[in-house]
Amino acid sequence: MDTLVIKRKKPRQSNAPKNSLPTLFLPEELLAEILPFFDVKTVTRLKCLSKSWMAFISDSNFVQKHLKNSLQNPHLTLFWFQRNCCFNVVPFPVYRLLKNPGINLYYSRCFHRLKHRLEESCEFVGSCNGLLCFHNYSETLARTHELCFWNPATRTTSKKLGSSLCDSNWPDLGIFHFTFGYDASTRTYKVVAFRANENGGLWKSQVKVFSLGDNCWRNIQSFPVVPFNWLNISCRRLNDGVHFSGTVNWLALDRSITHVKQIVIVSLDLSTETYKQFLLPPGFDVVPLFKPVLRVLMDCLCFSHDSNKTEFVLWQMKEYGVQESWTQLFKINLSYLQMHLPMHKDGFQLACLYVNGDRVIFADKFRKRAFIYNLKDKTIERIKNRNCIHWFDKAKDYVESLVSVC
Protein backbone atom coordinates (compact mmCIF):
# COMPACT_ATOMS: atom_id res chain seq x y z
CA MET A 1 0.00 0.00 0.00
CA ASP A 2 1.49 3.34 -1.10
CA THR A 3 1.56 6.17 1.43
CA LEU A 4 1.94 9.93 1.27
CA VAL A 5 3.82 11.86 3.90
CA ILE A 6 2.58 14.88 5.84
CA LYS A 7 5.02 16.69 8.07
CA ARG A 8 3.51 18.72 10.86
CA LYS A 9 4.74 22.23 11.49
CA LYS A 10 6.95 22.71 14.55
CA PRO A 11 5.25 24.40 17.48
CA ARG A 12 6.50 27.87 18.32
CA GLN A 13 7.19 27.05 21.99
CA SER A 14 10.89 26.45 22.51
CA ASN A 15 10.28 24.17 25.50
CA ALA A 16 8.21 21.66 23.52
CA PRO A 17 9.17 17.98 23.90
CA LYS A 18 11.61 16.70 21.30
CA ASN A 19 9.39 13.81 20.24
CA SER A 20 6.21 15.85 19.69
CA LEU A 21 6.56 16.11 15.89
CA PRO A 22 5.61 12.72 14.42
CA THR A 23 5.39 12.34 10.67
CA LEU A 24 1.99 11.22 9.38
CA PHE A 25 1.77 8.50 6.72
CA LEU A 26 -1.58 8.42 4.92
CA PRO A 27 -2.43 5.56 2.55
CA GLU A 28 -3.30 6.61 -1.00
CA GLU A 29 -6.50 4.55 -0.87
CA LEU A 30 -7.75 6.71 2.00
CA LEU A 31 -6.74 9.97 0.36
CA ALA A 32 -8.36 8.91 -2.90
CA GLU A 33 -11.68 8.69 -1.03
CA ILE A 34 -11.31 11.93 0.95
CA LEU A 35 -9.59 14.47 -1.32
CA PRO A 36 -12.17 14.42 -4.17
CA PHE A 37 -14.60 16.16 -1.80
CA PHE A 38 -12.23 19.12 -1.34
CA ASP A 39 -12.51 22.19 -3.57
CA VAL A 40 -9.96 22.83 -6.32
CA LYS A 41 -8.20 25.61 -4.42
CA THR A 42 -7.48 23.36 -1.43
CA VAL A 43 -6.37 20.38 -3.53
CA THR A 44 -4.10 22.57 -5.66
CA ARG A 45 -2.33 23.80 -2.53
CA LEU A 46 -1.62 20.20 -1.51
CA LYS A 47 0.40 19.75 -4.70
CA CYS A 48 3.10 21.91 -3.17
CA LEU A 49 3.75 19.50 -0.28
CA SER A 50 6.03 17.18 -2.25
CA LYS A 51 6.64 15.51 -5.59
CA SER A 52 4.62 12.48 -4.49
CA TRP A 53 1.62 14.69 -3.68
CA MET A 54 2.01 16.45 -7.02
CA ALA A 55 2.04 13.12 -8.88
CA PHE A 56 -0.92 11.76 -6.91
CA ILE A 57 -3.17 14.80 -7.48
CA SER A 58 -2.14 15.17 -11.13
CA ASP A 59 -3.02 11.56 -11.94
CA SER A 60 -5.81 11.38 -14.52
CA ASN A 61 -7.83 8.90 -12.46
CA PHE A 62 -7.85 11.23 -9.45
CA VAL A 63 -8.77 14.20 -11.69
CA GLN A 64 -11.75 12.26 -13.05
CA LYS A 65 -12.87 11.23 -9.56
CA HIS A 66 -12.65 14.82 -8.33
CA LEU A 67 -14.62 15.98 -11.38
CA LYS A 68 -17.39 13.49 -10.62
CA ASN A 69 -17.84 15.01 -7.16
CA SER A 70 -17.67 18.56 -8.52
CA LEU A 71 -20.69 17.86 -10.73
CA GLN A 72 -22.79 18.09 -7.56
CA ASN A 73 -22.00 21.83 -7.39
CA PRO A 74 -22.98 23.28 -10.80
CA HIS A 75 -22.14 26.81 -11.91
CA LEU A 76 -23.19 29.09 -14.75
CA THR A 77 -20.75 31.10 -16.86
CA LEU A 78 -21.71 34.79 -16.67
CA PHE A 79 -20.56 37.31 -19.28
CA TRP A 80 -20.84 41.05 -19.10
CA PHE A 81 -19.68 43.97 -21.20
CA GLN A 82 -17.72 46.94 -19.87
CA ARG A 83 -17.35 50.44 -21.21
CA ASN A 84 -13.78 49.79 -22.32
CA CYS A 85 -15.13 47.45 -24.99
CA CYS A 86 -14.02 44.29 -23.18
CA PHE A 87 -15.98 41.21 -22.15
CA ASN A 88 -15.54 39.65 -18.74
CA VAL A 89 -16.51 36.11 -17.80
CA VAL A 90 -16.89 34.50 -14.37
CA PRO A 91 -18.28 31.12 -13.20
CA PHE A 92 -20.97 31.59 -10.54
CA PRO A 93 -22.47 28.85 -8.28
CA VAL A 94 -26.09 28.02 -9.09
CA TYR A 95 -26.95 27.29 -5.45
CA ARG A 96 -26.13 30.89 -4.56
CA LEU A 97 -28.54 32.18 -7.20
CA LEU A 98 -31.28 29.89 -5.92
CA LYS A 99 -30.55 30.65 -2.27
CA ASN A 100 -30.66 34.42 -2.64
CA PRO A 101 -31.85 35.74 -6.03
CA GLY A 102 -31.85 39.24 -4.56
CA ILE A 103 -28.07 39.27 -4.11
CA ASN A 104 -26.28 41.78 -6.30
CA LEU A 105 -23.84 39.63 -8.25
CA TYR A 106 -21.42 42.49 -8.76
CA TYR A 107 -20.67 42.70 -5.03
CA SER A 108 -20.05 38.97 -4.64
CA ARG A 109 -16.44 38.01 -3.79
CA CYS A 110 -16.13 35.23 -6.37
CA PHE A 111 -17.60 37.54 -9.02
CA HIS A 112 -14.32 39.47 -9.03
CA ARG A 113 -11.92 36.77 -7.80
CA LEU A 114 -12.52 34.46 -10.77
CA LYS A 115 -13.36 36.91 -13.53
CA HIS A 116 -11.40 36.73 -16.77
CA ARG A 117 -11.12 39.53 -19.32
CA LEU A 118 -11.48 38.56 -22.96
CA GLU A 119 -9.89 40.09 -26.01
CA GLU A 120 -12.22 42.23 -28.09
CA SER A 121 -12.48 39.72 -30.96
CA CYS A 122 -12.77 36.68 -28.63
CA GLU A 123 -15.93 34.56 -28.64
CA PHE A 124 -17.08 31.94 -26.13
CA VAL A 125 -17.40 28.47 -27.68
CA GLY A 126 -18.49 26.38 -24.69
CA SER A 127 -17.74 24.74 -21.36
CA CYS A 128 -16.85 21.11 -20.72
CA ASN A 129 -15.59 19.42 -17.52
CA GLY A 130 -14.26 22.66 -16.06
CA LEU A 131 -12.56 23.94 -19.21
CA LEU A 132 -13.82 26.99 -21.08
CA CYS A 133 -13.06 27.14 -24.79
CA PHE A 134 -12.71 30.48 -26.57
CA HIS A 135 -12.39 31.25 -30.24
CA ASN A 136 -10.48 34.18 -31.69
CA TYR A 137 -10.09 35.26 -35.30
CA SER A 138 -7.84 37.62 -37.18
CA GLU A 139 -9.51 40.27 -39.31
CA THR A 140 -7.25 39.65 -42.27
CA LEU A 141 -8.11 38.79 -45.84
CA ALA A 142 -7.79 35.07 -45.04
CA ARG A 143 -9.63 35.31 -41.63
CA THR A 144 -7.76 32.66 -39.67
CA HIS A 145 -9.10 31.14 -36.43
CA GLU A 146 -7.42 30.39 -33.10
CA LEU A 147 -8.56 28.48 -30.01
CA CYS A 148 -7.71 29.06 -26.37
CA PHE A 149 -8.64 26.98 -23.30
CA TRP A 150 -9.00 28.32 -19.75
CA ASN A 151 -9.54 26.56 -16.43
CA PRO A 152 -10.97 29.22 -14.05
CA ALA A 153 -10.55 27.02 -10.96
CA THR A 154 -6.81 26.40 -11.46
CA ARG A 155 -6.32 29.79 -13.17
CA THR A 156 -4.42 28.24 -16.05
CA THR A 157 -4.68 29.18 -19.72
CA SER A 158 -3.42 27.39 -22.78
CA LYS A 159 -1.48 29.03 -25.55
CA LYS A 160 -3.35 29.88 -28.76
CA LEU A 161 -3.93 26.76 -30.85
CA GLY A 162 -5.46 25.69 -34.16
CA SER A 163 -4.40 28.70 -36.20
CA SER A 164 -4.24 26.63 -39.40
CA LEU A 165 -8.04 26.88 -39.82
CA CYS A 166 -8.93 29.45 -42.47
CA ASP A 167 -12.21 30.68 -43.97
CA SER A 168 -10.64 31.43 -47.34
CA ASN A 169 -10.68 27.72 -48.26
CA TRP A 170 -14.06 27.20 -49.93
CA PRO A 171 -15.17 30.82 -49.26
CA ASP A 172 -18.62 30.11 -50.71
CA LEU A 173 -19.40 28.15 -47.52
CA GLY A 174 -19.07 31.24 -45.31
CA ILE A 175 -17.52 31.35 -41.83
CA PHE A 176 -17.04 28.55 -39.32
CA HIS A 177 -19.05 28.04 -36.13
CA PHE A 178 -17.73 25.99 -33.21
CA THR A 179 -18.79 23.49 -30.54
CA PHE A 180 -16.68 22.12 -27.66
CA GLY A 181 -16.93 18.57 -26.29
CA TYR A 182 -15.17 15.54 -24.77
CA ASP A 183 -14.41 12.06 -26.11
CA ALA A 184 -14.38 9.83 -23.01
CA SER A 185 -13.08 6.78 -24.93
CA THR A 186 -9.73 8.50 -25.53
CA ARG A 187 -10.02 11.17 -22.80
CA THR A 188 -9.60 13.81 -25.50
CA TYR A 189 -11.18 17.26 -25.68
CA LYS A 190 -12.38 18.16 -29.15
CA VAL A 191 -13.67 21.23 -30.95
CA VAL A 192 -16.00 20.78 -33.91
CA ALA A 193 -15.90 23.50 -36.59
CA PHE A 194 -18.70 23.55 -39.14
CA ARG A 195 -20.15 25.73 -41.85
CA ALA A 196 -22.75 25.35 -44.59
CA ASN A 197 -24.38 27.27 -47.41
CA GLU A 198 -26.99 26.87 -50.12
CA ASN A 199 -26.00 27.11 -53.75
CA GLY A 200 -28.50 26.52 -56.54
CA GLY A 201 -30.99 24.88 -54.19
CA LEU A 202 -28.38 22.42 -52.89
CA TRP A 203 -26.85 22.53 -49.41
CA LYS A 204 -23.13 21.99 -48.98
CA SER A 205 -21.32 21.74 -45.65
CA GLN A 206 -17.83 21.28 -44.24
CA VAL A 207 -17.04 19.81 -40.81
CA LYS A 208 -13.63 19.71 -39.12
CA VAL A 209 -12.46 18.37 -35.74
CA PHE A 210 -9.65 19.72 -33.56
CA SER A 211 -8.22 17.43 -30.85
CA LEU A 212 -6.55 19.05 -27.85
CA GLY A 213 -3.18 17.28 -27.71
CA ASP A 214 -2.78 16.63 -31.44
CA ASN A 215 -3.36 20.36 -32.03
CA CYS A 216 -4.42 19.95 -35.63
CA TRP A 217 -7.64 20.11 -37.67
CA ARG A 218 -9.01 17.08 -39.54
CA ASN A 219 -11.83 16.86 -42.07
CA ILE A 220 -14.70 14.50 -41.23
CA GLN A 221 -17.95 13.58 -42.96
CA SER A 222 -20.23 16.51 -43.83
CA PHE A 223 -23.66 16.99 -42.26
CA PRO A 224 -26.26 14.49 -43.51
CA VAL A 225 -28.98 17.13 -42.98
CA VAL A 226 -29.20 20.92 -42.70
CA PRO A 227 -28.76 22.33 -39.16
CA PHE A 228 -31.24 24.94 -37.99
CA ASN A 229 -28.62 27.57 -37.41
CA TRP A 230 -28.11 27.98 -41.15
CA LEU A 231 -31.83 28.53 -41.76
CA ASN A 232 -32.29 31.35 -39.26
CA ILE A 233 -29.41 33.70 -38.47
CA SER A 234 -30.97 34.80 -35.17
CA CYS A 235 -30.94 31.21 -33.87
CA ARG A 236 -27.32 30.43 -34.69
CA ARG A 237 -25.88 31.07 -31.23
CA LEU A 238 -28.54 28.90 -29.59
CA ASN A 239 -28.21 26.07 -32.12
CA ASP A 240 -24.44 25.93 -32.59
CA GLY A 241 -24.49 22.40 -31.18
CA VAL A 242 -24.94 20.94 -27.69
CA HIS A 243 -22.39 18.60 -26.14
CA PHE A 244 -23.80 15.68 -24.17
CA SER A 245 -22.11 12.45 -23.08
CA GLY A 246 -19.48 12.35 -25.81
CA THR A 247 -21.76 13.60 -28.59
CA VAL A 248 -22.56 16.94 -30.23
CA ASN A 249 -26.21 17.48 -31.12
CA TRP A 250 -27.94 19.87 -33.47
CA LEU A 251 -31.58 20.44 -34.37
CA ALA A 252 -31.88 19.98 -38.12
CA LEU A 253 -34.19 19.49 -41.09
CA ASP A 254 -34.31 16.54 -43.42
CA ARG A 255 -35.76 18.47 -46.36
CA SER A 256 -38.02 21.38 -45.34
CA ILE A 257 -40.03 22.61 -42.38
CA THR A 258 -43.43 21.89 -43.90
CA HIS A 259 -44.09 19.13 -41.34
CA VAL A 260 -42.78 18.67 -37.83
CA LYS A 261 -41.70 15.06 -38.47
CA GLN A 262 -38.96 16.44 -40.67
CA ILE A 263 -37.42 18.21 -37.66
CA VAL A 264 -34.75 15.86 -36.32
CA ILE A 265 -31.77 15.82 -34.00
CA VAL A 266 -28.51 15.04 -35.77
CA SER A 267 -25.88 13.68 -33.38
CA LEU A 268 -22.13 13.48 -33.95
CA ASP A 269 -20.35 10.80 -31.89
CA LEU A 270 -16.98 12.29 -30.93
CA SER A 271 -15.47 8.84 -30.52
CA THR A 272 -16.32 7.35 -33.93
CA GLU A 273 -16.90 10.77 -35.62
CA THR A 274 -20.04 9.42 -37.27
CA TYR A 275 -23.62 10.74 -37.31
CA LYS A 276 -26.98 9.47 -36.10
CA GLN A 277 -30.44 10.99 -36.29
CA PHE A 278 -33.17 11.04 -33.63
CA LEU A 279 -36.82 11.97 -33.94
CA LEU A 280 -38.60 14.43 -31.69
CA PRO A 281 -41.40 13.28 -29.34
CA PRO A 282 -44.47 11.61 -30.91
CA GLY A 283 -46.69 14.11 -29.09
CA PHE A 284 -44.88 17.05 -30.63
CA ASP A 285 -47.50 17.38 -33.37
CA VAL A 286 -47.75 21.13 -33.94
CA VAL A 287 -45.20 23.05 -35.98
CA PRO A 288 -43.79 25.75 -33.66
CA LEU A 289 -43.72 29.35 -34.79
CA PHE A 290 -40.04 29.64 -33.84
CA LYS A 291 -37.26 27.11 -33.93
CA PRO A 292 -36.93 24.84 -30.85
CA VAL A 293 -33.70 25.03 -28.83
CA LEU A 294 -31.56 22.16 -27.52
CA ARG A 295 -29.91 22.29 -24.08
CA VAL A 296 -28.60 19.89 -21.44
CA LEU A 297 -30.65 20.13 -18.22
CA MET A 298 -30.66 17.70 -15.26
CA ASP A 299 -28.03 15.60 -17.04
CA CYS A 300 -30.37 14.90 -19.96
CA LEU A 301 -30.77 16.28 -23.46
CA CYS A 302 -33.74 18.68 -23.54
CA PHE A 303 -35.40 20.97 -26.03
CA SER A 304 -37.79 23.87 -25.63
CA HIS A 305 -40.25 25.60 -27.93
CA ASP A 306 -43.24 27.89 -27.96
CA SER A 307 -46.81 26.61 -28.26
CA ASN A 308 -49.30 28.86 -30.06
CA LYS A 309 -47.22 31.89 -29.05
CA THR A 310 -48.72 31.64 -25.56
CA GLU A 311 -46.80 28.86 -23.77
CA PHE A 312 -43.25 27.75 -23.10
CA VAL A 313 -42.78 23.96 -23.35
CA LEU A 314 -39.80 21.90 -22.18
CA TRP A 315 -39.16 18.27 -23.14
CA GLN A 316 -36.56 15.87 -21.74
CA MET A 317 -35.02 12.77 -23.39
CA LYS A 318 -34.64 10.59 -20.30
CA GLU A 319 -32.70 7.89 -22.16
CA TYR A 320 -30.37 9.34 -24.76
CA GLY A 321 -31.15 8.24 -28.31
CA VAL A 322 -34.46 6.56 -27.39
CA GLN A 323 -37.44 8.40 -28.88
CA GLU A 324 -39.92 6.68 -26.54
CA SER A 325 -38.13 8.25 -23.55
CA TRP A 326 -39.17 11.81 -24.48
CA THR A 327 -41.13 13.31 -21.56
CA GLN A 328 -42.78 16.71 -21.33
CA LEU A 329 -41.45 18.27 -18.12
CA PHE A 330 -43.68 21.33 -18.03
CA LYS A 331 -45.73 23.78 -20.03
CA ILE A 332 -45.94 27.35 -18.71
CA ASN A 333 -48.31 30.07 -19.79
CA LEU A 334 -46.17 33.05 -20.74
CA SER A 335 -48.47 35.40 -18.82
CA TYR A 336 -47.24 33.71 -15.60
CA LEU A 337 -43.69 34.67 -16.61
CA GLN A 338 -44.75 38.30 -17.08
CA MET A 339 -43.83 38.04 -20.74
CA HIS A 340 -45.99 40.73 -22.28
CA LEU A 341 -43.83 40.74 -25.41
CA PRO A 342 -42.70 37.12 -25.54
CA MET A 343 -41.93 37.10 -29.23
CA HIS A 344 -39.67 39.19 -31.39
CA LYS A 345 -38.99 39.41 -35.09
CA ASP A 346 -35.69 37.59 -34.46
CA GLY A 347 -37.26 34.60 -32.72
CA PHE A 348 -38.26 33.20 -29.35
CA GLN A 349 -36.91 35.36 -26.54
CA LEU A 350 -37.00 32.93 -23.58
CA ALA A 351 -34.35 30.35 -22.64
CA CYS A 352 -34.32 27.79 -19.81
CA LEU A 353 -30.92 27.83 -18.06
CA TYR A 354 -31.37 25.49 -15.10
CA VAL A 355 -34.01 23.28 -13.47
CA ASN A 356 -33.93 22.28 -9.79
CA GLY A 357 -37.15 20.62 -8.64
CA ASP A 358 -39.92 23.22 -8.74
CA ARG A 359 -37.53 26.11 -9.42
CA VAL A 360 -36.42 27.08 -12.91
CA ILE A 361 -33.89 29.74 -13.94
CA PHE A 362 -34.98 31.55 -17.12
CA ALA A 363 -33.26 34.13 -19.32
CA ASP A 364 -35.35 36.85 -20.95
CA LYS A 365 -33.50 38.22 -23.97
CA PHE A 366 -35.96 41.05 -24.63
CA ARG A 367 -35.50 42.55 -21.14
CA LYS A 368 -31.88 41.38 -20.77
CA ARG A 369 -32.52 39.76 -17.41
CA ALA A 370 -32.70 36.41 -15.61
CA PHE A 371 -35.31 35.28 -13.11
CA ILE A 372 -36.34 32.24 -11.07
CA TYR A 373 -39.81 30.82 -11.65
CA ASN A 374 -41.50 28.56 -9.10
CA LEU A 375 -43.53 25.90 -10.92
CA LYS A 376 -45.56 25.11 -7.81
CA ASP A 377 -46.80 28.53 -6.70
CA LYS A 378 -46.21 30.34 -10.05
CA THR A 379 -44.12 33.15 -8.57
CA ILE A 380 -41.12 35.01 -9.99
CA GLU A 381 -37.93 36.18 -8.28
CA ARG A 382 -35.68 38.43 -10.33
CA ILE A 383 -31.92 37.90 -10.20
CA LYS A 384 -30.32 41.26 -9.59
CA ASN A 385 -27.07 42.38 -11.15
CA ARG A 386 -25.33 45.68 -11.68
CA ASN A 387 -23.73 44.86 -15.03
CA CYS A 388 -25.46 43.93 -18.26
CA ILE A 389 -24.98 40.16 -18.16
CA HIS A 390 -25.57 38.20 -21.35
CA TRP A 391 -27.84 35.56 -19.83
CA PHE A 392 -29.67 34.45 -22.94
CA ASP A 393 -27.00 32.88 -25.16
CA LYS A 394 -23.80 32.82 -23.06
CA ALA A 395 -24.83 31.50 -19.62
CA LYS A 396 -23.65 27.88 -19.88
CA ASP A 397 -23.14 25.01 -17.45
CA TYR A 398 -19.77 24.88 -15.70
CA VAL A 399 -18.15 22.81 -12.91
CA GLU A 400 -14.86 23.36 -11.07
CA SER A 401 -12.21 20.79 -11.99
CA LEU A 402 -8.51 19.95 -12.01
CA VAL A 403 -8.53 19.18 -15.75
CA SER A 404 -5.37 20.44 -17.46
CA VAL A 405 -5.53 22.94 -20.32
CA CYS A 406 -2.56 21.20 -22.01
Image (cartoon, grey):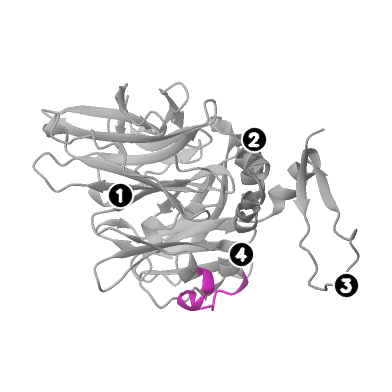
How far is disc 4 from disc 2 in space, using C-alphas?
Answer: 27 Å
Res 235 label: 1
- Taking the image as shown, residue 347 lies to the left or right of residue 380, namely left
Q: Nearer the viewer, residue 172 or 87?
A: 87
How far is disc 2 from disc 3 in space, using C-alphas?
Answer: 45 Å
Callout 1 touching callout 4 (CB < 8 Å): no
How far is disc 2 from disc 1 in space, using C-alphas?
Answer: 39 Å
Q: Earlier in the sequence, mark 4 or mark 3?
A: 3
**If the image is split into quadrants, where does the C terminus sit?**
top left
**If the image is split into quadrants, where does the N terminus sit?**
top right
Q: What's the residue at 30%, 49% (across, down)?
A: 235
Q: Nearer the viewer, residue 217 or 288?
A: 217
Q: Which residue is disc 2 drawn over?
A: 61
How far is disc 1 from disc 4 in space, using C-alphas?
Answer: 29 Å
Q: Earlier in the sequence, mark 2 or mark 1?
A: 2
Q: How far across and how far down the image is residue 143, in percent? A: 15, 42
Callout 2 touching callout 1 (CB < 8 Å): no
Q: Amino acid at mark 3?
A: Asn
Q: Earlier in the sequence, mark 2 or mark 3?
A: 3
Callout 4 touching callout 2 (CB < 8 Å): no
Q: Nearer the viewer, residue 309 or 317?
A: 317
Q: Is residue 259 visible?
A: no
Q: What's the residue at 56%, 68% (across, down)?
A: 97
Could you tell me which secondary element the residue under label 4 belongs to? helix
Res 15 label: 3
- Badge 4 local density, few (<14 within 10 Å), some, or many (20+)? few
Callout 1 touching callout 3 (CB < 8 Å): no
Residues rendered magenta in the picture: 99-110
| Disc nearest the viewer among 2 and 3 | 3
Q: Quadrant of residue 356?
A: bottom right
